[in-house]
Each structure stands twice: as structure tokens, then as C-alpha cells.
Amino acid sequence: MAIEAARLSPSLAAAAFLARRPPPALFPFSLRRRLPLLRVLAGSSGGDGRVVALSSSELRKRRGLSSSSGAADPASGGDEKLRSLRRLFSRPDVGIDAYIVPSQDAHQSEFIAECFMRRAYLTGFTGSAGTAVVTKDKAALWTDGRYFLQAEKELTHEWTLMRSGNHGVPTTSEWLNDVLPSGCRVGIDPFLFSFDAAEELKDSISNKNHELVLVRGMNLVDEIWGDARPKPPKEPTRVHDIKYAGIDVPSKLSFIRSHLTENGCDAVVISMLDEVAWLLNMRGSDVPHSPVFYSYLIVEVSTATLFVDSNKVSEDVLEHLEKAGVKLKPYEAIVSEVERLAEKGAKLWLDSSSVNAAIVTAFKSSCDKQMKKKGKAGKKVEKEASSDEPTGVENGTVNAVYNVSPVTLAKSVKNETEIEGMKNSHLRDAAALAEFWCWLEEEVCKSVPLTEVQVAEKLLEFRKKQDGFIETSFDTISGYGANGAIIHYRPTPEDCSSVGSDNLFLLDSGAQYIDGTTDITRTVHFGEPSPRQKECFTRVLQGHIALDQAVFPERTPGFVLDVLARTSLWKIGLDYRHGTGHGVGAALNVHEGPQSISYRYGNLTALQKGMIVSNEPGYYEDNSFGIRIENLLLIKELNLANSFGGISYLGFERLTFVPIQNKLIDVSLLSPSEINWVNDYHEEVWDKVSPLLSGPTRDWLWKNTRPLLDVTH
């Protein structure tokens, strides 16, 4: 599943900030500062050379697209949600001139429960990534290249689409500095912003003397959502058995406590949901597609406290936690607990890139109060460095270490049991996909009418037959023809196409099993692909092969490898607007940090043995077709003839075993070694998956794993 770079550690915040702009070598800072900011001129064509952002209705008009079913009619008097939100700006307890609505929940999650989908509710845009900004007379939405086409279709005429990453498009803070008069108040819900993000925003808007206002006690979108807002999830949690987890909870807590001691800390706040689940060997179902549950965890030197709704904790789970020495407190008690720790003078470890601003500012305020009570001048903030990167220093009076969570890297490097579970679950998943593709090919050849939604539902049926299946790992992307060019397209029964034999069909899907998480994309053609489609597909395949075969020294960050996947496309002037690889959890989130493979060079996290990443280059021709080929890869150490510098060299081991359609490959473009790669891969697919199949499906797999030269002659 295509995604941009994973979450960065606090030490990388500055690099990440720069990475959102063009590389300095191509776009000097002094020149960037002099460029005029992008103006919202819905009626302007931009003929004077300026970059112009158009309203969504104008974008649709120019493209010949109609509004989505939920779009407001311009003649109806505008967007009632926007009007209701703006009315709250002038309340005495609010008093703001603009409000920012991000996509995240209080844990910086990518996938969130329905009750926290505030940005989607307000804007109508349902993509997983984006930020909405509303002033008293303007409304704009920022999203990245994966969602440009989707946003154009879903936004109403009152919203302006900001294409993040495109030349000349301002950041949210730059836009606010441009459209607001000096000295305005910009409001946010501090639970929805990491402390780092809030501080960066605060600094950016201060250039125009704007004040960042932490609107406490309520979320303004919730206020207008009212009783219609879905209730918070109440699903029970479960124990993730040691035969799948590999390491027990006391051992994991001991590991965390050793880090506390090394850093001179008394406690650490863990707020990322997958980190809590991994550390406690627990799983839940509060969030669609992700086996996590809403909670916080504080680990102290001798105790640990889980902040969670007690109704989600069964007797079995409670016994599991008690054996590990973990006690329970209500989910809402997290702020009061960090205030208590401040009052007792505890030194707290905070990952300021993930812990929300509400928690960190509460801790800082309590520390300040304690210092004043004691009549002390206070200590300076200790923003101590990790073993790899300095985190920087800020002045203040808080007794804290700001550092990347000690769970982040430990979770991303899989143990032997987790690796075995990932391998086993991928083989069962491959069997389900072989059954599915055999069925779909036969149905399309018989001209049976099937919509994109029906196809996705049928795939789910095949997966449900596999042992240990729990749910999908994300909404299946089932895109035929032009819909395949929408990178994170999601069909609905009311708005989808039929799958036929005249164009390409892109299917990106994954599953959550009891022992692993899968994510795979295949692009096929059930008729005769055009030469253009074959060339594009083959160049995407060449990029996929190049990355799959990469050999690199340890301590190499993922962005260094990204060029391998794009070079074959660049040679003919093509590219794609998403990262090439994301981390994947073991029976956890399908998108996992800190590792990634992306053109966004701000993520300096080194790829390490035991990490799992996706390999998914693509190409998307707007309003025509989309192509993506995705496998998951396990990073392994290689036994090479040399070891220059005395260091280890790493490579990849494939986890995904599903045929790549031979008919889409232009063999004339492939080198002998690339042809050998395809043939070797298909031989491995046959050897590993055929024992799990029988009858027509086994015959289908045989046909689709024949060597390329057998197919072309």
C-alpha cells in the first residue's frame, strides 16, 4: 500500500521540515524566501507565470469532472459545517481567527476510529492523509500526491485544494501568514498535534506575530458534530500469545527500564498505539484494519501503568497484565498522571514527535509550578541525544528527556518468532490470492459483470477461509482503468466501475492474521494491453527488481535506495508521487516506522537486519490507468566475499509469493539478469505455494509461473 515516509524521530524534525520543500541544491533557500506565496485565485488561469491554487469546483470544471454525491451546491448558500465552525471562533472561551483540523487522533495514528475522523467529517474528503485549515472567510485542504484526484472529486466548491509537495505550494503556516492580518490567533486541539508539530507551527506563525492557541477542554469539530458523532469504540482487547510474540512482557519491560536507567530517567510515556500493543503483547480492534486499542502506557523503574477503558479488559487480559506487574487506570487519567509525576520531581522520557502537545505542555506547566513553589530558578531542559543523533536543546524548566521512544526501533526489528509468523501468514495469503485471481480471470473471460466492490468482497471471502485470518489490513484498493490512477482509490457501491478486459486492473490489498500482516499489489490486464501499458509496466517492474536485488552496507538509510526503483522510469521522463517502501508490523499496523524507502530524504533511519519493508514502485497516468507492483521484503545480513571497512552488508528476502502477470512484460526491455529474476521468482512462487493448492487453482498457478521465454515463444 503506497505511503509516504514513516514517522520521524524528534532528532529528524528539522530535516523533515526541509524535506517538504525542494532540495536546496535545486532551489536555494534565499531564492525560496523571495518567491511570492501561492494565492487563492479561483478565477485566475495563472497565465502570468504564477502558481495558482484553484477551488475544487473549478478544478472539476476544468477536468470535466462532476462533484461527488456529497458536494454542496454553490447556489445552496454554502457549507453549513463551515458556518457552524466559524461561529465558534468568536465565543469568549475560544477567541480565534483560524482553526487547524489534522487527520490524526491523540496518538498520531494513520488509521483512526470513526469518532475521530474529524477532518473527513468537516471537509468530505475521505483520504487518510490531509490537513484542513479554516479562517473566517477561507477554507483550504492540504494533501499529498496520492490523493490529488480523490480530493478534487470529494471537496465542495468552498474548499481550496493545496497540492502538498508541488512547486510553489505553501505550507499551512506559510498560507496562514499570507492570508491573515498580523497578530491573529490560530487555534488547535493540543491532543491532535505532537509536541514537535505544535512547536514548529508556533514558531512558523510567529513570523507574522500570530499566536498559537491550544483550545483545551473541547474540540470545535466535535462541537458542531454533536449527537451525530459516532461513539468511541468499546471492543475488547486480547492477549497476543507468546507463540506469536516471541518475547514475554516482563522481558520487554526490562529492556525499556534498562534504557530509562541509561538515560537517567524515572519514567517514559508510550503513546503510539502499536507500541503499547507490542510492548504488552496485547491486541485490540478499536481501529479498523489495525489490531490496536486506545490507550497510553507509562513505564517507571519499578511499575507500569496502562491507561485504558477497563471495560475493554477481560479477566484473561487482566491476569496477563497482573503477571507482568502492569496496573490499570482510566484512559482519561493520563494528563493528571503526568502532572503527578511532575509534582514528585520525576524525570520523564517523552518522544516529542509522537506524544501529543496536551500531555507535554501539562507536564511542563506542572514542572514550572513546582519550581515556583520551591523558589528555585529551575533547571534547563535536558534534550539529551540518542546514541545515533543529537536531539537539540531548548530552554525551559521541565525535567524531561526528549528522545525517540525506546519501543520504536525494538518493535521494528522483528525477532525470530515474529519473522516465522510473517513468513507463514504470507504463504496462506498467497494461497488465497491464487484462488482469487483464478476465479476473477475466469469470470472476466466469461464476461460476467463484476464491479470493483464485488471483486474486493470476493477477495475477502477467499481470505476468510485461511487459518488465523482476522480482518483486512487496510481498505482494499480495487481500481479498474482510470480509477487505478487514483493512488489510494476506494470504490463504493454508489461510485465504482465494472472490471473488464479493455484496460488495466490494479488491486492493492492486505490482511491481518493472528501471526502476521500482509500487503500486496498486483496489476493485470485480462485482454490485450497496449504497447504503452506494457512499456510502463515493464519499467515499473525493472524498478521493483532493482530494489529487490539491492545490496547495501549497514547503517544505510532507506532514502538512499529509493533511486533504484525510479531510474528505469526516469529514463523516459516518468515517475510516481509516493514513497517506494514503508515499514510493516508483525501482526500489527500495516504501516510502521521508523524505517522507510522514500524520495523524502529527511528520514535518516538506518535499515537494519530484521526490519520488514514494502517494495512498491508504480506509475499512474491520470484518467487512464495505474500500475503498481508490491512485495514485502525482510532485511537480512548477506554473507559476501568481502567486508569493506569491517562492516556487514545487507540485502532483502522476499515474503510475498504471488505471480506477476507475464503478458504485461515487454521482454525486449529486460536485461538477461532481469529475465532470470522473473523466472526465478516465479519458480519460487510455484515451489512454495503449489503444495497449498489443488484443482483449477493449482493449474492457474502453473500457467502463471511459466518461464518468460516459454511464454514469448
Image (spheres, rainbow, N blue to C red):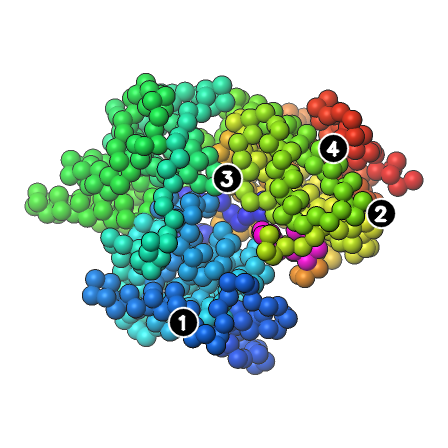
The part of the chain drawn in magenta is: 479-492
Front residue of 182 and 691: 691
Name the residue that disc number 2 marks: 668
Determine whether, in the image, residue 641 is placed left or right of residue 147: right
Secondary structure beneath label 1: loop
Mark 1–mark 2 contact, CB under 8 Å? no
Residue shown at the point (59%, 68%) measured from the top left: 66
Amino acid of disc 3: His
Amino acid of disc 4: Tyr
Amino acid of disc 2: Ser
Name the residue that disc number 1 marks: 138
- Answer with mark 3 or mark 2, whichever residue precedes in sequence: 3
- Answer with mark 4 or mark 3, whichever residue precedes in sequence: 3
- Answer with mark 1 or mark 3, whichever residue precedes in sequence: 1
Amino acid of disc 1: Lys
Secondary structure beneath label 4: helix
